[in-house]
Image: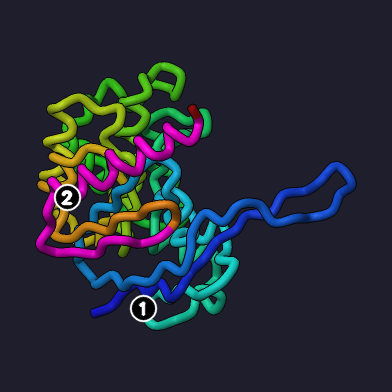
């Protein structure tokens, strides 16, 4: 079953000049098309600046395509209320915020918004699966390290049981044990998972498919992935980008 359909999507941000007029910036994504099936585990890779995070922002409707269209379960994004869409497609940013809440409040808050009953068992379940120490529950955001905040943000997303989970560099600030734990947890959830990552070994273990972006274009969409070719293409793209700045 096709859950997401990205159809010839391009994105060019606009910026406001000092005179208050809007002008187009540089194109970030160009004519990107792919589909995502229910239950897919997809790694999205590419050199820095290739458009990976922008793609996630489009899928979460934080920005709108300049051209093309996106569909979720056969409906155009424009026909789905934004709040309803974001409850089903959750985006965990690389540097997430807990908005000054304690860990317990951060885990409870999205369930409260959804009027979920029996919140405590849901919290207990995710705490146990992700090995979150119970003494963390009363800690504030400022009492957590960057990696701990990231871990709680992922837990907060999982507790909502979204249909699609978008993870932007989910293990960038995690130690090896938590990276392995996350693999096990994601293997067990019903959500479709798309993860942007530079960690190729982790991506290989997570995914059954890879999408590779280069300079805003989709250059690879494969199930049988030649990871050495992926590494080489990204290394070459990064070297060419560095040469342009020299």
- The local crowd at label 1, few if under 14, some if 14 to 19, many if 20 or more residues have their Cα within 10 Å, is few
In-image side of 152 versus 202 (left or right)? right
Q: Nearer the viewer, mark 1 or mark 2?
A: 2
**Residue in view at x 50 percent, y 75 percent:** 69
Q: Quadrant of residue 183?
A: top left
> On the image, numbered disc 2 is attached to which residue?
229
Is residue 156 in view from this perspective? no
Q: Nearer the viewer, residue 145 or 237?
A: 237
User: Which residue occupies the foreground of this view, 145 or 111?
Assistant: 145
| Residue 199 screen position, x and y as percent | 22, 37
Element carrying mark 2: helix
Q: Looking at the image, can residue 84 be seen?
A: yes
In the rendered image, residue 118 lying in the magenta stretch gets the answer no
Q: How is the image coloured?
A: rainbow
Residue range highlighted in magenta: 217-245
In the depicted structure, whether residue 192 falls above or below residue 239: below
- The image quarter in which residue 35 lies: bottom left
Q: Which mark is residue 73?
A: 1
| Secondary element type, mark 1 | loop
Q: Is residue 165 left or right of residue 225?
A: right
Q: Residue at x 18, y 37 (%)?
A: 130
Question: Main structural element of the magenta stretch: helix, strand or loop?
Answer: helix
Quadrant position of the N terminus in the picture = bottom left
Residue extending farthest bottom = 74
């Amino acid at each position: 079953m096709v859950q997401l359909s990205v159809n010839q999507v391009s994105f060019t941000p606009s910026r406001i000049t000092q005179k208050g007029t809007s002008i187009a910036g540089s194109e970030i994504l160009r004519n990107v098309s792919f589909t995502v099936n229910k239950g897919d585990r997809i790694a999205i890779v590419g050199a820095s600046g290739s458009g990976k995070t922008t793609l996630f922002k489009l899928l979460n409707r934080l920005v709108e395509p300049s051209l093309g269209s996106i569909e979720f379960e056969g409906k155009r994004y424009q026909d789905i209320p934004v709040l309803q869409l974001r409850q089903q497609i959750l985006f965990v940013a690389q540097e997430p915020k807990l908005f000054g809440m304690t860990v317990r409040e951060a885990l409870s808050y999205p369930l409260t918004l959804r009027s979920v009953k029996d919140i405590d068992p849901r919290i207990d379940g995710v705490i146990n699966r992700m090995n979150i120490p119970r003494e963390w529950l009363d800690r504030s955001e400022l009492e957590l390290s960057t990696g701990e905040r990231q871990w709680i943000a992922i837990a907060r997303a999982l507790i909502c049981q979204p249909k699609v989970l978008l993870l932007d560099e989910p293990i960038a600030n995690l130690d090896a044990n938590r990276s392995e734990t996350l693999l096990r947890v994601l293997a067990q959830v019903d959500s479709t998972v798309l993860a942007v990552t530079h960690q190729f070994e982790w991506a290989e273990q997570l995914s059954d498919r890879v999408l590779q972006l280069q300079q805003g274009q989709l250059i690879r969409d494969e199930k049988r992935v030649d990871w050495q070719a992926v590494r080489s293409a990204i290394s070459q793209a990064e070297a060419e980008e560095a040469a342009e700045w020299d």
